[in-house]
Amino acid sequence: QLQLEESGGGLVQPGGSLRLSCAVSAFRFEDFDIGWFRQAPGKEREGVSCISSTGALTNYADSVKGRFTISRDNAWNTAYLQMNSLNVEDTANYYCALASKPRSSVCTAVPTESQYHVWGRGTQVTVSS
C-alpha cells in the first residue's frame, strides 16, 4: 500500500531551523516528483516546494526561497525539507505528496495540489518565541 509519512516537525523559535522528512513506501519512488505543501490555521493549503524524480530540478514558493531547501534520497525512499531562518508566518501543518503519475515531470513551477494525489498526514511546525 502506498503511504507517505512526514516527521521532524515541532516547536522552534524565530530564526531557528527544522528538517522535515517524508518517508515513502512506494515501488519506483525514484520515478515520482515530490511536493511539500503547508496549511496554516484558517488558510488554504499552499505549495511550498517540489523536487523532480531525479532531484535535478527544484522549485520554491517566493515566501521560502533562500530559506528552505528540498532534497531526496532515492536509495532510502525519503524526501527532505530543510527549513532555516524560520519565522512565525511559517507556522503550519506541513504535508508531502507524491505526483499523480510516474515520470510526469510536474515540478516545473511551485507545486499545486491537483498535480499530486497521494498525501501524508502532515507534521506540525510551530514557530514561536
Image (tube, rainbow, N blue to C red):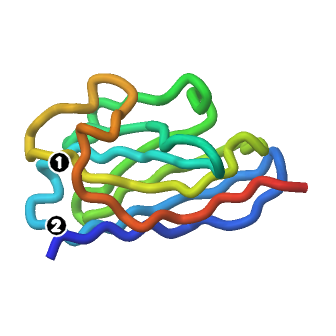
Residue at the outermost bottom position: 1
Residue 63: percent from left, percent from top: 61, 28
Q: Is residue 7 placed above or below 105 in the rendered structure?
A: below
Which residue is pictured at 55% across the width and 48% down the height? Answer: 39
Residue 48: percent from left, percent from top: 48, 38
Quarter holding the N terminus is bottom left
Which residue is pictured at 16% across the width and 46% down the height? Answer: 100
Residue 11: percent from left, percent from top: 75, 64
Q: Is residue 94 placed above or below 114 in the rendered structure?
A: below
- Left or right of 84? Residue 106 is left
Q: Secondary structure at mark 1?
A: loop
- What residue type is disc 1 on? Phe
Which residue is pictured at 35% across the width and 44% down the height? Answer: 35
- Give 92 or 58, whichever is nearer the viewer: 92
Give the residue number, with chain letter if any, for mark 2.
26
The disc label shown at residue 32, or none: 1
Using the numbered discs, state the Cα–Cα distance from disc 1 to disc 2 in whole angstroms: 9 Å
- What residue type is disc 2 on? Ala
- Give 9 or 30, whichever is nearer the viewer: 9
Q: Quadrant of residue 109?
A: top left
Q: Secondary structure at mark 2?
A: loop
